[in-house]
Amino acid sequence: MAPGQVFGIEVGEGEELKHSGWVLFIHPDFLWKTPLAKTIKQYEYFDYSVNEPYSFREEETTITGIIQNIEQEYHSNIDKFSQNVNIAQLELLLTYAERFYQRQFITRKITNHKFSTGWRYSGGIFSTAKIYPEKAATVQYVAEKLNISPNY
């Protein structure tokens, strides 16, 4: 999630919540006057679609380990190194997430080829756009219909 994004889990009436995981919230003041405050905007995956998981077991283990380190530091006694240690852990978390995000583009080359050679999609939006240019599909619309990130 990126700042301003909305997150929620819907549970139907009488249904039990079957999801588990963690969420790490970082207040902008925590990053104030740190190099990370400037560089955090460079990470592309904040625009990643939630319907596109890219996690493998090893990646999940790595990310979870870093989160546990952050949690441990958060619950430790505060000293003059506390913020720097957590900023370093956060930078490591973001770097690994960027690595995993970029890696999925390499591992999906075959899938990307299928998209580029098979733009025939059942909704007919491309043929409609030729006849009615004002009804041309947006990148967001096409991405949703193909169940991929608009960054593709």
Image (spheres, grey):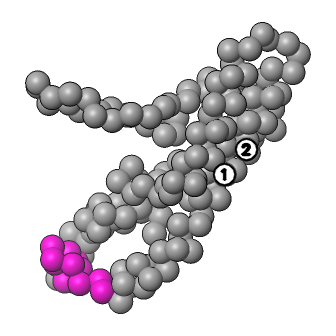
**150 relative position to 144: left or right:** right
Instruction: Kindly identify which residue carries mark 1.
Output: 96
Please state which amino acid type lies under the numbered disc 1: Tyr
Tag 1–tag 2 contact (CB < 8 Å): yes
In x, y percent, where is residue 2?
52, 39
Question: Residue 130, relative to residue 68: is it above or below?
Answer: below
Residue 127 part of the magenta segment = yes
Residue at mark 2: 92
Disc 2 element? helix
SS at mark 1 in the image: helix
Look at the image and say whether residue 60 sits in the magenta stretch: no
Stretch of the chain drawn in magenta = 118-130
Q: Position of residue 40 (x, y in %)?
A: 68, 43
One can see residue 28 in this view: no
Please tell me in which quadrant of the rendered image residue 116 appears: bottom left
Vertical relation: 73 (above or below) 132: above
* Residue drawn 67% across the image and 43% down it: 93
Counting every numbered tag in the picture gives: 2
